[in-house]
Image (cartoon, rainbow, N blue to C red):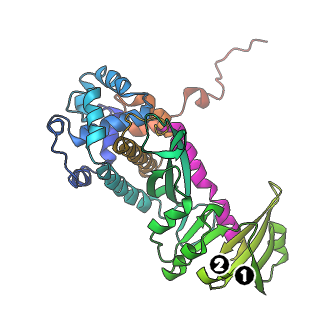
Amino acid sequence: MNSGRTIFSQLLDFVPRYEFNRCMQRYPDDHYEARNFSYFDHFLCMVFAQLTFRESLRDIETCLRTMGPKLYHCGLRSSISRSTLAEANHQRNWENHAAFAQVLIRIARKLYADEAFGVELNQTAYVLDSTLIDLCSTLFPWARYQRQHSAIKLHTLLDLKGSIPCVVTLSEGCRHDVKMLDELIPEAGAYYIMDRGYVDFARLAQFPVHGAHFIIRAKSNLCFIRGAYHHISDAEHAAGLRCDQMIKLRRPRSARDYPHPLRYISYYAAKINRHFTYLTDDPELPGLIVAQLYERRWQVELFFKWIKQHLRIKAFYGISENAVRTQIWIAVSTYVLIAIIKKQLQIEHSLSEIQQILSIALFEKDSLYQRLTAKSAQSEETGSCNQLALW
């Protein structure tokens, strides 16, 4: 890339402008501010805030205005004002940014299609989970959670290849996780990995109908009738597999909701000295693969931890529901954009390291590739032959 351009300007080369403009036209904003503050300027300001972890709209305005002429060369054509930013976050439909995030997600999933995630599996594997974000009940009365508290729940369906979020849904904190299964359209042949909070046999019965499979952790009060056993070899027993059998649900309601046979797998994790029991509808997948897939469920926890630590989603620049959803979807777009840059430029650094480098070098005129691949001079100097000995 041209080293005469700023890092921020080179970063925008990975943003498909044509697709961005198409997404922003889905719900156009006819407000007066839209003529003076474009959708792309709005997006750039919010991406800048996410990458540099700005605290407030005033903070965004102050930092961007100090850059002066560099803003024009980065693509920002409008004058930055916190009131204009607040109006854009409040007025412009968040679904535009959700649609563009899906465009970036499709690009990233193609790049990471052949990425290994530690399990020998030809099919796609997803992890479904949610995280809670606490809010002030006075400022966010629409996000009801408890009597004196407010919160929003971030439901995420994560593709294990590259840890790319495929589905992101925002709801009130009091909404139960299992209701997310009503909005999910299972992909044929894919595996969906879930925790015990998603145990609802009537909803789980929809996965085999669509040709998909689920792997879920069983509850301790599960009642079932034992069926055929799968043979466990000595190698599988040494790896932690303790039980692999077919079962049928015993309770009348559960048996009515899910009348088909289920597979019951017991696994002992020696590293943490704990026993786990899993349920799956796939009778042929090896038991150890089932246990390994569930262990990869931790990737979604790492994703939640990453975006909370490195992006701005625990504190918001606006108090309306539209502003909150807009900020979260732009944060998701920022995460996926960093993943795209890492893959296309073949960067060895982790996503957090790339984000940290970008946060302090956005307006420097340097090559993006060289800045992300440069090693510190201290690590390269393993010892100079010209250094005099002190003793």
Residue 334 in picture, x, y percent from top left: 41, 44
The front one of 164 and 274 is 274
State the SS at label 1. Answer: loop
**Which mark is on residue 254?**
2
Q: What is the CA distance from the residue labelled 1 to the residue labelled 2?
A: 7 Å
- Reading the image, the residue beneath label 1 is 250
**Is residue 297 highlighted in magenta?**
yes
**Front residue of 138 and 88:** 138
* Viewer-nearest residue: 22 or 92: 92
What residue type is disc 1 on? Arg
Q: Which residue type carries mark 2? A: Ser
Q: Give above or below for 190 relative to 327.
A: below
Q: Residue furthest front?
A: 147
The boundaries of the magenta stretch are 290-311
Residue 258, which numbered label? none
Q: Crowding near pointer 1: few (<14 within 10 Å), some, many (20+)? A: some
Q: Is residue 90 magenta?
A: no
Single out the residue that lies furthest toward the bottom: 228
Q: Horizontal placement of 268 versus 58: left or right?
A: right
In what quadrant of the picture does the C terminus appear? top right
CB under 8 Å between callouts 1 and 2? yes
Query: Is residue 337 found left or right of 91 in the rendered image?
Result: right
SS category of the residue bearing label 2: helix
